[in-house]
């Protein structure tokens, strides 16, 4: 059994918000799953991206519009989405409140640009062109 105390959670800040790693292969006794909290800034527009595995998102607070494979869905507190592997996605946070979510994924989940081209304003932590990366909060 492993316990990750709140004080030991790993926080990664991006231009869009803060990802807090709750458990991952390097945190929580080499967990086989990764779980993190997303605190998205109000009005944030996330990058278009995909993951090579299924992710499960549950919204705790605030709201968002999620564009998944060309379909737009509005979500809020208590809603859960299962985002399939290899499907393009983009998230838009509530302009006044942002959102808070918990996300679960298999260990080693890799993010990538579905078009194979980096967005011109991509942050330093984003995958570059065709590379596939395990984000810091999933490691």
Image: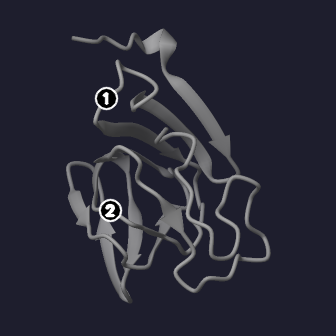
Q: Residue at x 57, y 86 (%)?
A: 115
Under circle 1, the secondary element is loop
Q: Position of residue 126 (x, y in %)?
A: 66, 60
Q: Position of residue 14 (x, y in %)?
A: 67, 47
Q: Please, is residue 60 above or below residue 116 in the view? A: above
Q: Residues within 10 Å of mark 1 (few under 14, many from 20)?
A: some
Q: Are marks 2 and 1 in contact (CB under 8 Å)?
A: no
Q: Which mark is residue 65?
A: none
| Quarter of the image where one finds residue 121 | bottom right
7 relative to 135, above or below: above
Q: Is residue 129 left or right of residue 61?
A: right
The residue wearing badge 1 is 31
Real-space CA distance between mark 2 and mark 1, rounded to the nearest whole angstrom: 16 Å
In the picture, measured across the screen, residue 101 lies left or right of residue 94, that is left
- Which of the two residues, 122 or 131, is positioned nearer the viewer here? 131
**Quarter of image, res 85:** bottom left
Label 2 Cα neighbours within 10 Å, binned few <14 / some 14-19 / many ≥20: some
Which quadrant holds the N terminus? top left
Q: Position of residue 87 (x, y in %)?
A: 37, 78
Residue sitting at x 36%, y 85%: 69
Nearer the observer, 56 or 78: 56
Q: Which comes before the other along the chain, label 2 or label 1?
A: 1
Under tag 2, what secondary structure? loop
Residue at image coords 52%, 51%: 134
Residue 55 to residue 112: above or below: above
- Indicate left or right for 6 with 42 as reference: left
> Picture coordinates of residue 56 (x, y %)?
26, 54
103 vs 80: above or below: above
Left or right: 85 as drawn, with respect to 127: left
Indicate which disc residue 53 carries: 2
At 61% from the left and 82% from the top, the residue drawn is 116
């Amino acid at each position: 059994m492993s316990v990750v105390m709140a004080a030991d959670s790993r926080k990664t800040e991006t231009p869009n918000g803060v990802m807090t790693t709750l458990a991952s292969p390097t945190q929580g006794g080499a967990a086989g799953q990764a779980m993190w909290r997303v605190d998205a800034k109000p009005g944030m527009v996330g990058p278009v991206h995909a993951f090579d595995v299924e992710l499960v998102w549950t919204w705790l607070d605030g709201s968002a519009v999620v564009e998944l494979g060309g379909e737009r869905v509005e979500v809020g507190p208590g809603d859960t989405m299962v985002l399939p592997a290899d499907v393009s996605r983009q998230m838009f946070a509530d302009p006044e409140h942002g959102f808070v979510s918990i996300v679960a994924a298999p260990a080693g989940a890799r993010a990538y640009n579905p078009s194979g081209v980096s967005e011109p304003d991509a942050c330093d932590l984003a995958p570059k062109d065709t590379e596939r990366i395990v984000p810091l909060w999933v490691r």
